[in-house]
Image: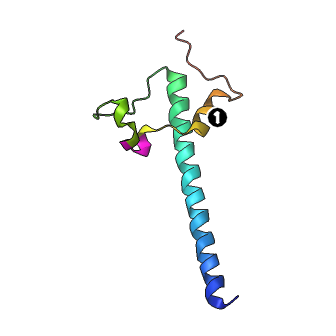
Amino acid sequence: MGILNTDKDRIMSNVTFQQVDETATDLQRWIDRLSHAAQTGEPLELAGSGAVDVADAQSWGPDRCIPAAALRDVLTSNTPSIYTGR
């Protein structure tokens, strides 16, 4: 292995760690939003002013697509924090 390959591997590792950190941060934001909605009983508005047409779902951005891991985290949480309307 030459120096060039080692530097390339190091740079790729840094990019990968940065992407993982961003993904974890994005996931935590979703968990926080979902938890807040569950605690308050308020709907989580994802459409904003955009149209809600399921046929166009493939073109929706990540701000309109809840990660399954966030749903799993909120729904299987050990702390009961779901709004009951009482």
Q: Give SS at disc 1.
A: helix
Q: Which residue is mark 1?
A: 73
* Percent of width and height locating residue 47: 35, 33
Check the picture and name the quadrant holding the N terminus. Answer: bottom right
Q: Is residue 62 magenta?
A: yes
* Percent of width and height locating residue 75: 63, 27
* Percent of width and height locating residue 37: 50, 27
Residue visible at 45% across and 22% down?
Answer: 42
Residue visible at 60% across and 57% down?
Answer: 20
Q: Is residue 67 magenta?
A: no
* Percent of width and height locating residue 85: 52, 11
66 sits left or right of 2 in the view? left
Give above or below for 66 relative to 80: below
- Range covered by the magenta-colored residues: 59-63
| 26 or 32: nearer the viewer | 26
Residue visible at 56% across and 68% down?
Answer: 15
Q: Quadrant of residue 7?
A: bottom right
Q: Quadrant of residue 22?
A: bottom right
